[in-house]
Amino acid sequence: MSAAELPPKPEWDRAQRTALGVGVIGLGLCVLGGLIGQAMEGESEGGFLRWLFDRGQFFRSYLVAYLFVLGIGLGSWVILMVHHLTGGEWGWALRGVLRAGTRTIPLLVLLFLPLLLGLRDLYPWMRWTQEDIQESQALQFKTLYLNAPFFLGRAFVYLAAWVGFSVVLLRWSTGLPHSPAEPEPRRLRMLSSPGLLAYGLTITFASIDWVMSLEPLWYSTIYGPLFATGQALTGMAFAIAALVWLAPAAEFEAVISRKQLRDLGNLMLAFVLLWAYMSFAQFLLIWSGNLPEEIIWYKRRLQGGWQLLGVLLILLHFVLPFLMLLSRDVKHNPRTLATVAALLLGIHLVDLYWVVVPGALPRQEGDAPLQLHWMDPAAILGLGGIWLAFFLRELRPLPLLPEPVPAEENHHG
C-alpha cells in the first residue's frame, strides 16, 4: 500500500467524537453563561454572579476563540496557495493537511454568525450617540466607515471571497498527482496569484473591522500585514504538528526526507522572524512618536498584569522558537519540530488574547487588570473542538502523505 493510500488511524474516530463532544459542551456552557448574564442585566446587585455570568464576556471570549480557529483555516489556505505558486517538496509534505484545513473555511463562515448578535457588546462605535458624534470631529470622520450597514456589507464580501476562492482552488486540485515527480496544472498557479492578493486585501480590512475597531480612536498602518503574518504562522505550525502526530511513524520516515523537514523548519522560522520584526516596528514607531492617541494601545497592555503576557510573547513567540529553529538537529527531528510548532500555535492564542481583550473590556472604571474568565478557555475548547472534529472529517478522504519519489527522480525546490 502506498503512502498516499494509508487508511486513517483507528483512533481517528474516537478523536473526532471526543473533539466534537468537548466542543459542544464547551460552547454550550459559554452560551448558557451568556444567556444567564443577559437575564441578570436588569438586576442592580449580583456581585460575583454578575461576573460569573456575563453576556459581554461571552462575546469577548467567542471573538478570541473564533479568530484563533479562523487563523488556522485561512493560514492553511494561504500556505497552500504559496506552494502552488512556488513549488518545492516542502509543500507536498503538508498538502493533505493544508487541503483539509482549507476545507473548513465554510464552517468558519457559519461560526462567524453568532458574533453578529454581539456587535453592540463588542464595538463602542456601535453605541455612539448623535451627541457623541457631534462633539468630536474625529468621530464624525470615522462614522463614514464605522457604521453597521457598511460593516455588515464588508463582512459579507470578506467571507464570500474566502469561500469562493478556496472552494474553486480545492475543486481544481481534485484528482491531481500526489507526488512532486508529476507536474501540476498551470491553472492552480493562475488561481493562487489573485487568491493571495484577495486574501491580503480582505484580511487587512477584516482585521481593522473585527479587531482594531475595538478601540476605534487608535490605528496602526502595519496592523493588517501583522495579522496576516500571524495567520500564516498559525497555519504552518498547525499543519506541521498535525502531520507529525497523525501520520504513522514508519510511513512518515519512509516518505518525508530530512531535507523536507529542514525546509519546513526554515519556513516556520521565517514567519517567526517576520512576525517579530513587524511587532517590534509597530511598537518602536508608536512609542518613539509618543502621541497620546497612539500610545494608549500599549499602555493598556503594559500595566495591570497584561505586561506579563507581553513578556511571555517576547520569550515564547520569538526568542525560544528562534533559538530552537536555528538548530538542524531540531529541524531534522519530527517530534521536536512538531513540539516547536505546537508551542507557536499555543503562544499565538495568547497573542490574540493580549491584542483583543484589553481593547474589548468595558472602561467605566478605567483600564481593567488581567483577569482570566472561565468562558475564555471554555470558548477555546468549544470552537476548537468543533473545528477539529470537522477538520478530521475532511482529512479522512485525503492522502495524508505524498507518494514516495523514486531516487532517480528526486528533486528539491
Image: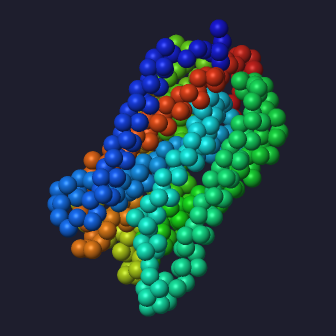
Please indicate, yes or no, whether residue 364 appears anywhere in the rendered image.
yes
Of 348 and 120, nearer the camera is 120
The image quadrant of residue 346 is top left
Q: Residue at x 43, y 74 (%)?
A: 127
Q: Residue at x 58, y 14 (%)?
A: 7
**Residue 297 coordinates in the image, percent (x, y):** 38, 70
Of 361 and 261, nearer the camera is 361
**Residue 349 coordinates in the image, percent (x, y):** 40, 48
Q: Residue furthest top?
A: 1
Q: How many marks?
A: 0
Does 105 sit left or right of 376 as displayed?
A: right
**Residue 285 coordinates in the image, percent (x, y):** 45, 73
Q: Residue at x 53, y 33 (%)?
A: 390
Does 192 sit left or right of 152 as displayed?
A: right
Please indicate, yes or no, whether residue 288 appears anywhere in the rendered image.
no
- Image quarter of the C terminus: top right
Q: How is the image coloured?
A: rainbow
The correct choice, above or below, for 395 with respect to 229 in the image is above
The image quadrant of residue 105 is top right
The image quadrant of residue 411 is top right
- Image quarter of the N terminus: top right
Q: Residue at x 82, y 35 (%)?
A: 185
**Residue 295 coordinates in the image, percent (x, y):** 37, 75
Does 186 sit left or right of 228 as displayed?
A: right
The correct choice, above or below, for 38 with respect to 392 in the image is below
The correct choice, above or below, for 376 with respect to 364 in the image is above
